[in-house]
Amino acid sequence: MVDTSFLPALSPFDVERAAELIQRAYAPPAPTTTPEDLKRLQHELFELQKRPEAWGLVIPLLDHHDQNVQFFGAHTAQVKIVRDWDSFPQEHAERLRDLVMQLTAHSMSTGRGKFILRKLFVAITSLALKLVPGHPSRWPDWIMACVTIFSGRGAPPEQIHDFLAIVAEEVVGADLLGPSKIQIQQSLTDAMPMVLQAIGSALKFPLQIPSALKCLQAWMGQIRGGDIIPLIPVLISLLDQFSTESEIFVAASDALQEVMSKSALSDGSGSRTLTEPLLLWVDSTGSRIVEASLSAGDVDEISHSFCKLLVALGDHSASYMASNISSTVPVALPAPSSLLSSPPKTKGYLTQAFLRILLAYTGLPGYYGVDEEESEMTLSFWYLFQEALWSNDAVESGDDNTPEPGAGQQNEQVAMAKAVYSELVQILRRKVAFPSKGSAWSKDQIDKFQVYRRDVGDTLINAYYVLREDMLGYYVDDVTQRLNSRQENDGWQDIEATLHCIVSIQEATDMEKSFHLLRLFSPETLGRLPSAGHNRIRRTMLTLIGTYSSWFATQSDPSNLLMNVVSYVVPALTDPLLCLQAAVALRNLCDANRKVLAPKIAAFAELHAGLGSIPDTEKSKVLQSIASVIQALPPGEEIPPIEAIVDPIVQKLAAALQPSTMLPDEARIIAIQQLETLSGVAKGLTRSTDGILILSEDDSETQAKLDEMTRAREDPRMVKLRDAIFLAVRGAVDRWSIDAEVSHALSDLFKSITCLPTDTTLITLPAGPLLELVCLASRRQLTAMWLSLAAILIGQLNPPPSILLSSNSATIKSGPTAEAQAVVGGALPILLECSLGMLGVPGAMENNPDVVQEFFVCMERVAQDFTGLFYHSLQPAALDALIHCAIAALALQERYSLVSACTFLSILIHRSSTNQILLAEKDRLMQAHGRSITKAVLEGFASVAPRSVVPNLIELLGTLLSRAGGGTGGGGGAGGSVAATWISEILFADNFVPSKATPEVKEKFIKAVLGSRSLKRTREAAQQFTLVARGLEGSGFGYTSVSM
């Protein structure tokens, strides 16, 4: 008789009421039941489980006649063990252990449902995780003890297998670290002989095989390789039952997949004991499965499982197959007579047979997602196989395709690998073709097929690394041949599929060597593709042109070819269904081929004249394309065309700003369109190369271009145009700065029309006046977007300098100009006033994390480039308010807000410390706020801040220790005597945030910090303190979360 006296006693009324509540919550909802009713019931059950008396519900609920109530009883046992263990009287732990085992054994012997038993098995394992660790252990040999009790009560083997499987699954997923993990792991190791014996014995009885193999899968990661190897022949022999026992076949297949993916052999080892026996079985027996599927035109459960087995074998043995794809070495190993052959089959033959079968699944007839689901499963193998071929030098990973002299075996490998991938690319070309019209696919089927096409595209890249230009040549030949043989009523889906494949491999293609593209873009090919209707193939071809736009720049004289392609793209601009792809293609072409297209500027003038027929949504891309071509002209020649395309935009924007000319909504829509269009023009006029400009003393040509741009900008026409742009933009800010869509368009324009000095264009606006507009908009309604823009513009006011390299030295201008100082000095108080006014409202920081983040990013930018302004342009009270706001942000739960505040404080303290002029101000700042910052950091460690930001808090602590004053140390802490004093006072203060850090832990942390002379040691001490203070010591999750 099991002692239950330690459990709370509940009256029959309380038990019945709980059972009734459970039945109402789990019963099928009545028509009158609302979601709120169900939520309320679930909440009541949750609250019921939280009560200490809930321990007393376990037994009566398990004895109830309703299975839902029984399940809740088992669930309550598990929840109480996991969640409320700390409050359970530990002197009763062993009695609880015995009770849970007996309750489980009783439930097994009385035929309780599987889902109830599973929950009880989880409860036992949860209890073991509490009781096994420790010296002495309160539950030694717990797995054997449970199995002994269950078997003694007549539990069938299948239930024993299920229990053992759950034990392994729960232990693997447990969050344990250190000694606890070692003890639990040892308990699994101790039980291993019993587990293996149970599995081995069950494999002799067909009814027990499925549960035994599921148990084997769960324990796979725990079993030594030497213990797995004897099971492999048995598992392979079970595969022979595919025609009679589908459940056994699937279970054996799943177990073998687990062997190859999660066991001690998962690293590709076991070629003689695992790979080769499976390859022999695949060739002799498994091939019949795929043949049956192809004959029947259907993939059944057996065939689906076989495909998964093939993929697992390929993933496991990709390196073996790459090494042996053409091997003539025979496979000789002990095997059942059914697998032996005379003469022995070679490794190369078995590898090729495997590849043929896998290709059959890759190329299953029909359409993926509609007729079959298996072809997609095979795609990952072709990536692994290609990587393995590279690793084995079977194909060249570089640009040199010339085999090593005398490498006969390698040449055979290369030839065979290319043959396999040649077959693959032909199969995949067929598989990505859409059906002809009238297929009536649902939207979900179309979407799924589109995803499959993208996945195939990734696989084709791997194929390209094997085949190189031969692959591109095959696809271009395919397009040409299909065009040559095409009949009038033929569809375009096959040619479209080939074009899609060409699009997919662009990122791997060597543009300078892709001579096959000459034929693809020639009038003989491009000119025969449809130019009206047939939207799918036209959309794909437009995408292809945009994707390969940079290829034209590699050709010696691409002018005619390029204009031929542009002529194909331009008509599609007026088609609402194709204009997006056409506009993107034109933009990419013009951006990548500016100099080649510049002499054709007249043709683009005609395109500009016909702009009215192009949908408004794509006009900005078209004008960006034209602007890209204009940018290639000499600056003086840019003036007329820029006037021609920008002036109408500015006029339309100005007209939208006149209240009397149009309705408010119409004016707003037009303003957004014109702002977007102006952004596109500004992007097009910006040079396409990035980076800091480096001028050598004899680089007169580059300097001459910069001077020429300066002179062109001073042309009265351009000065007038820029003034008009600024006035129109100011008007938009005045009228619509609180409108989200207009603000977004303004933001994009500000980013596009400002730049570093070396990228200046004829319409580039200075950052200073735009920063004033940002301040104006922020006064009206502060948003994260305006603060982000302010940070960008402030950064542009102190740009990285161009570098003048002389023969003896590098002269670099440093520091912002006086004008920039004045502009930012005027903006900083405004931005601070707006931001602190908003964030100072209770709850505002928590409710506006984006504003908090961008505010401190902006302040960080000022601290980085204009540090002195915090002390010279702000009133002391304003600076104090800013620091108080930053300290408050260190207690936020939103990661990015807290990180940005951390970074700002670190930068401000560091930059103030490294500037001799600001040392006195920095000392005053530390005297006023240093202790408060330190307190916020330490309380963040203890519990206040999210664990993921602990590394950022550690960086801030390191800055305080090294820069707060009072010592001579570096980045660690020995010199930060002032900060060290603060730390000691704060940790032992009565008002320090409650934590699990004892006085001894605090002393140890202080000692470690004081004795540290490196940030690394400080970091380690802070991480350990955080774990202990939060009660996470010994937790793998805790360690990971504070050390990322």
Image (cartoon, rainbow, N blue to C red):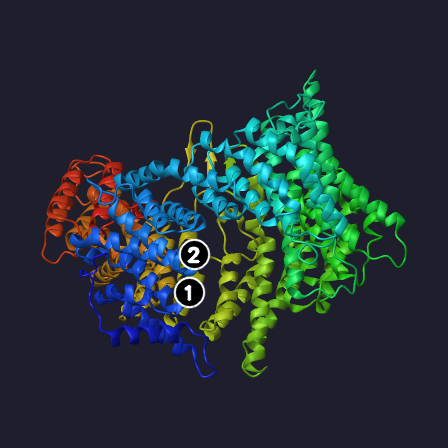
User: Could you say where residue 162 lies in the image, as x and y percent from the top left?
Assistant: 43, 50
Front one among 955 and 722: 955
Task: Mark yes or no: residue 822 visible.
Answer: no
Q: Position of residue 450 (x, y in %)?
A: 66, 56
Measure the C-alpha gap from mark 1 to mark 2: 9 Å
* Left or right of 708, for residue 77: left
Residue that label 2 marks:
793
N-term mark: 1 or 2 = 1
Residue 239 shows up from this direction: yes
Disc 1 + disc 2, Cβ < 8 Å: yes
- Mark 1: amino acid: Val
Vertically, is 945 above or below 320? below
Q: Secondary structure at mark 1?
A: helix
Q: Hey, what amino acid is under mark 2? A: Leu
Furthest residue in direction top, as rendered:
406
| 1033, 813: nearer the viewer | 1033
Residue 619 point in image, percent of width and height: 65, 64
Q: Residues within 10 Å of mark 1 (few under 14, many from 20)?
A: many
Residue, disc 1: 774
Q: From what the image shows, is residue 579 above or below residue 497?
A: below
User: Looking at the picture, does residue 405 appear above or below residue 790?
Assistant: above
Q: Is residue 38 above or below residue 382?
A: below
- Secondary structure, mark 2, is helix
- Percent x, y of residue 914: 26, 42
Tell which of 79 and 698 is nearer to you.
79
The residue sitting at 40% across, 67% down in the picture is 67
Quadrant of the image for the N terminus? bottom left
